[in-house]
Image (spheres, grey):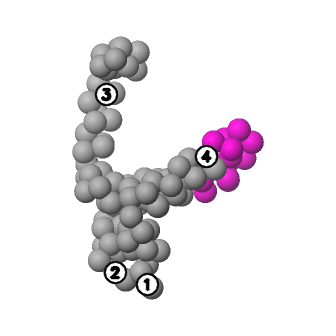
Amino acid sequence: MSFTLDDLAAIVSARAGSTTEASYTKSLLDAGPARAAKKLGEEAVELVIAAMEGEPRAIVAESADLLYHLVVVLQQHGVALADVLAELERRTARSGHEEKASRPA
């Protein structure tokens, strides 16, 4: 499979220029940051529940929903996915314990 988060970000960006009638993404963006953030939170909770129940198919579906809504929130705030990935790359250059200890209190 070759679909990437960059592909998803490009789709969300393209749909931001659509109409609310044609695009759920556009309707989320037009509803404002609070609506997109609320949906992201809902999907995060649904993923937690799926993980606790341990059903792999549900975990896959809820993970996809979470990633989509995360990309919408990034779009809403003008944050490039590349910036998030660069931050992950920076953090993974050392152990998680070291990285966490280096964060400001």
Q: Which mark is residue 18?
A: 2
Q: Identify the residue shown where x is 30% and y is 19%.
A: 104
Disc 2 marks which amino acid? Ser
Q: What residue is pinned by disc 3?
A: 91
How packed mark 3 is, by other alpha carbons closer than 10 Å (few <14, some 14-19, many 20 or more), is some
The relative height of residue 10 versus residue 98 in the rendered view (above or below) is below
Q: Quadrant of residue 20?
A: bottom left
x, y (%) of residue 28? 44, 68
Callout count: 4
Q: Earlier in the sequence, mark 1 or mark 4?
A: 1
Cα distance between the residues tagged 2 and 4: 29 Å
Look at discs 2 and 3 and give the one toward the viewer: 2
Disc 3 marks which amino acid? Arg
Q: Quadrant of residue 85?
A: top left
x, y (%) of residue 19? 37, 83
Magenta stretch, residue numbers: 48-62
Task: Report whether residue 43 is seen.
Answer: yes
Q: What residue is pinned by disc 1?
A: 22
x, y (%) of residue 90? 26, 30
Q: Are marks 1 and 4 in contact (CB under 8 Å)?
A: no
Q: Callout 1: helix, strand or loop?
A: loop
Cα distance between the residues tagged 1 and 2: 7 Å
Q: Callout 3: helix, strand or loop?
A: helix
Q: Earlier in the sequence, mark 2 or mark 4?
A: 2
Q: Are marks 4 and 3 in contact (CB under 8 Å)?
A: no
